[in-house]
Amino acid sequence: MKKLIGVAILTKMLLLGTSVHAQEQARGISSDDDIIVTARRSDERLQDVPISITVLDSDAITKRNIYNAGDLGAYVPSLSTNSQYGPQKSSFSIRGFVQEGRTSPSVGVYFADVVAARANTGTTSGNGAGVGSFMDLQNVQVLKGPQGTLFGRNTTGGAILLVPAKPTDRLEGSIEGTIGNFDARRVQGVINIPLSDTFRVRAAVDRHKADGYLRNRNEMGKSRLGDTDYIAARLSIVGDLTPDLENYTIFSYSRSNTNGVVPKYFACDTSPPAGTLAEALAPLGCAQVARAKARGDGFWDVDDHNPN
């Protein structure tokens, strides 16, 4: 993935109940610490939802260090991710229902109840859960099985709901830093400000940069591949227009300069069947394998001549 820039604005109007308890549930808060989900397009307790669902709250996301779509499949049963073209472009599969290129998606992704865009190209092109999507979330809900009744078409396998943390009426904030190998540096910051009794804002930013773990031996391409380099920001605004009418608007920005991974040949067939495509391509693959052996390439050495 190279230089992907995205800007999105989500806005929705919600009719809220007049009781304090109803308003708290609409904001994802529960007085008795129940887990509130929106699997049926309304705020309900998790134990009251009669479908197969896995929920990861903000603490679970942080403890598991889930920061891209490729990480989610490792912690959710029945959910798999195809990260062949990099974790930032991972596609989801639920119970064998895939989401590959040139096919209609069978797993829908929704951010703040709005369906995420998905490109349809010759390669798996992601699912709309791009960089920054897992920043400052209230929870992630994975709904398994057909969800067409409430979420429309292209959810025969299921749906993944990314619920961002909503502005609250408390002044609070947090900052988190990460240092790792390959010169990894990551900083996340969140601040929540109640400007008045009826107007609240919340801002979050995520900056992550790490060197690649693949060494490119081709001088024409990037020296390192499989790196991480992105920035994402989000601004959420909630305004109580009337006692029963609320406006919730989200501004999102992301930019990625991450360089993905490339395949590597370890061996080639020197005697492919005559008259086949393999016979025509085998010399190219064998030449690359021979070049790698002559250089003394190690396991993490690759050969890629594409500068982008």
Image: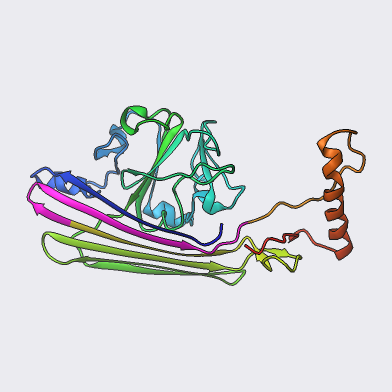
Percent x, y of residue 262: 68, 54
Does 213 lie within the magenta span? no
Identify the main secondary structure in magenta: strand
- Position above or below: 227 against 147: below
User: Which corner quadrant holds the N terminus?
Assistant: bottom right
Residue 248 location, x and y as percent? 22, 52
Residue 11: x percent and y percent? 25, 51
Q: Nearer the viewer, residue 92 or 27?
A: 92
Report the front residue among 158 and 58: 158
Which residue sits at x=75%, y=65%? 218
Q: Residue at x 72, y 61 (%)?
A: 305
253 within the magenta span: yes
**Is residue 142 among the parts visible in the rendering?**
no
Q: Is residue 139 left or right of residue 98?
A: left
Q: How many marks?
A: 0
Residue 221 seen from this side: yes
Which quadrant of the rendered structure holds the C terminus? bottom right
Q: Where 132 sits versus 121, above or below?
A: below
Q: Nearer the viewer, residue 297 or 120?
A: 120
The x, y position of residue 269, in whole percent, is 88, 42
Colour convention of the picture: rainbow
Can you name the residue that lies furthest to the right here? 271
Q: Over which residues does the magenta segment extend?
A: 239-260
Q: Quadrant of residue 174?
A: bottom left
Query: At 9% from the left edge and 46% from the top edge, which residue is drawn?
Result: 244
Side (left or right) of 174 relative to 260: left
User: Considering depth in this image, is 7 or 21 the residue closer to the camera?
Assistant: 7
- At horizontal 59% and vertical 72% (from top left) the residue drawn is 183
Tell me: residue 173, above or below residue 49: below
Image-based side of 301 in relation to 105, left or right? right
